[in-house]
Every structure is written in structure tokens, then in C-alpha cells.
Image (cartoon, coloured by chain):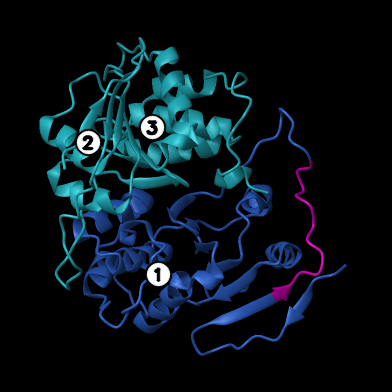
Chain colours: A cyan, B blue
Amino acid sequence: MKAVEIPSGDSDTCRTIGVAVVSKSPPATGDYDDDLQFTPPFNFAMVDHGIYRSGFPDPTNFSFIQTLGLRSIVYLCPEPYPEANVEFLRSNGIRLFQFGVDGSKEPFVNIPEETIREALKTVIDIRNHPLLIHCKRGKHRTGCVVGCLRKLQRWCLTSIFDEYQRFAAVKARVSDQRFMELFDVSTFKHIPKEFSCLKR
Amino acid sequence: MKAVEIPSGDSDTCRTIGVAVVSKSPPATGDYDDDLQFTPPFNFAMVDHGIYRSGFPDPTNFSFIQTLGLRSIVYLCPEPYPEANVEFLRSNGIRLFQFGVDGSKEPFVNIPEETIREALKTVIDIRNHPLLIHCKRGKHRTGCVVGCLRKLQRWCLTSIFDEYQRFAAVKARVSDQRFMELFDVSTFKHIPKEFSCLKR
């Protein structure tokens, strides 16, 4: 049967595509065989339980992404999601949360704090897990959202920047790091206990 | 009460310190307060459910590591584990598996395949989870073990090297990558289903 679109409650900062899957497609890869290989997207990594990050996934990554059993994708670019990706989400019952953050370059930087905050709220909502956060290269926009999540998890800035730089490498931006440093997490009072570093 | 050492079955490739905790210490950090901060070890990351990686943890990292609720540490250097770290493991009921791999530098490289294989067996044994894999800098030895795990998880080499290089950065070694490429995973027939990319 076909996937059915659900009207979704969009806000100023987030556009969503909700899908209900009536019958989930079987994995495209079929049964295991010795030649089967997976291609995670560029800059793919596990952030915490139920949270992954990466660069932009293309169709060569779809069979890998299927293995993650995602419920949602948090997409941080303003550009429309490619039709092939929308179709992949539809047939796998994955909901798309789009937060349009411009990929502005230094020194013309304007990281929209409210949008990052809304994205972070979506990321920590365990009803959306497992989820994948991605932008274009998985460096700056994704790096900022993950860095703010780490602040919420009470990581010291040194460790937050260590992680940010691992993904951004030579493209690391002082402005992103300053954004994370200034990001106020005091309004986030309730963090899900499932997060590794808040588990007792 | 005090932790009690259990005699452990050491093999040629692995030395273990087993501990039974009679009464687990409470987290050293006490209750949450606004000033509480965690310092993950250098190069810390989540590899998969129940598997973490990092550089050598020092006492400033202990309160963070406590939040992971580790059952084991897989330590990949031949040097003795520092007394402060042994004490930390004892008081938290964490078992140490030590696989002494020399930190040899190119071009004098000799990665002991059998030792890496034994380490990997320990890593994928879910009875040891959650566990932390570490060496000195979390780059080469840890990178090789994680890379071999990714082969087992059927990642393509491009993605394995992308991840390896993210941690090794300018210290990435062609010899490590060649080792991972040649590593034969055909003898590992049963991979725990819990791994993200083998979940259906």
C-alpha cells in the first residue's frame, strides 16, 4: 500500500513532512549476502542513544539509513528536500523536520538562535527518536545543534569544541564556536534521562 | 564496603582485571547543580549502542565516565594501567580487558592481527557492554579496532576510512588503513543484532 501524507503543524521556524506508512517496504538490500555493503553518509556518527548526525544523504546511503530504523530526520538547510529523499522518507515512514538555516560563510555570519533552539527541542524529544540530524556537509549547522545539545548535557566547552572540530576539520569556524559558547541552555530544564551522560 | 578482586582467566593476548563491587560508590559529582560540568576524554565518541571510544582517560574525566554506566574497558596499550584508573574501575565495578598493542610508528609498523581480533571479540560481546575502547590518543589502535568492527558491520572502506581519519586527523596512517582493508572478518559469523546497522 501507499504512504499517506498527514497534514502537519508547521511553525515559523520548522516545516514538517509527516508520513504514515501503511505497509513498510522491505529493506532494499534483501537477505544478507557476503557482498552486501553499507555506505553511511559522509560525516556520519552516533551522537547519543537515538540520535545520529551526518552530511546530506544521497540514494547510495539509503540502504544503510534503513538499518537505523529512523523515526525522523532533522534537516537544517532552507533548500527543498530532493524528491528521491522525500520518496525514501515516505516509503520508510520517516518524518522530516526542516529548519531552514542559511549556510552563510564567515565573515557574513548570522546563526539564527531561535531556529537552532527549535531544532534542538525537536532533537531531544524522544518521541522523534531515532533521528538523524543533517545539513549539507554535517559540519557547521549540524555541528552547532550537536554542540548546543552537548551544552545541555553539561559538557565543558573544550570537549564540545573537540567534537565540533573533528567534523568541521579545516573548515572549523570561530563564529560557530562563539555561538555555542553563548547559547543559553537555562530554559531547557528537562532533559530526557535516556541520554548517556545523564544516566545514573 | 570494598571492591573485591576476582581471579581472571588471562590469555596470551589479553590481561584482565575483574572486580566485583559490593557497594557501588555514588557519583562523585553529587546532585545536579548549575555549575556541574563533564569533561569527556579527548577524542571521545559513541561508536554504537553500548560501545564508546576515546583517548586515555585521566581523573578529570572520571565523573563523565561514571555517567556512562560502563561494565568494561578495552585498553589497547602494553603499559600498566595507572593506579588512579585501576582504583576508579574498582570502585565502579568496571572490568579491564588489556590488549597490549605497541604504539609503533611508521615505517616500523607491526599491527598484531591476532590481538586486534581478540580485542574485537571482546568488544562485540554484549555481556561486556557498555564498554569503552581506548588507547593513548584514541587514533591508531582504537581506530583500527573500530575500523575492523565497521567491516563486520559491512561498512564500505570509504566510510571506514572517513571515520578513521576523523579521529586520526593529520596523524592518519596508510598502514592502519591497509590493515583494516586486509582484515578478514569471514570468521566472525555471528554479530549481535543490537548493532545499529544490523537492526532490522
Q: Main secondary structure of the magenta part?
A: loop
Q: Are marks 1 and 2 in contact (CB under 8 Å)?
A: no
SS assignment at label 3: helix
Q: Quadrant of the N terminus of chain A?
A: top left
Q: Is residue A122 left or right of residue B158?
A: right
Which label lies toward us, 1 or 2? 1
In whole angstroms, how far apart are the C-alphas of marks 3 and 2? 13 Å
A196 falls in the magenta region? no
Q: Can residue B79 be seen at all in this image of the molecule?
A: no
Mark 2 chain: A
Q: Is residue A135 left or right of residue B118?
A: left
Mark 1 chain: B
From what the image shows, is residue A56 above or below residue B64?
Answer: above
**Horizontal and vertical percent position of residue A191:** 59, 33
Indicate the quadrant where residue A155 lies: top right
Return the mark for residue B192: 1
Kindly identify which residue carries mark 3.
Answer: A143
Taking the spot 47% from the left edge, 73% from the top edge, the residue there is B125
SS assignment at label 2: loop
Taking the spot 58% from the left edge, 22% from the top edge, the residue there is A185
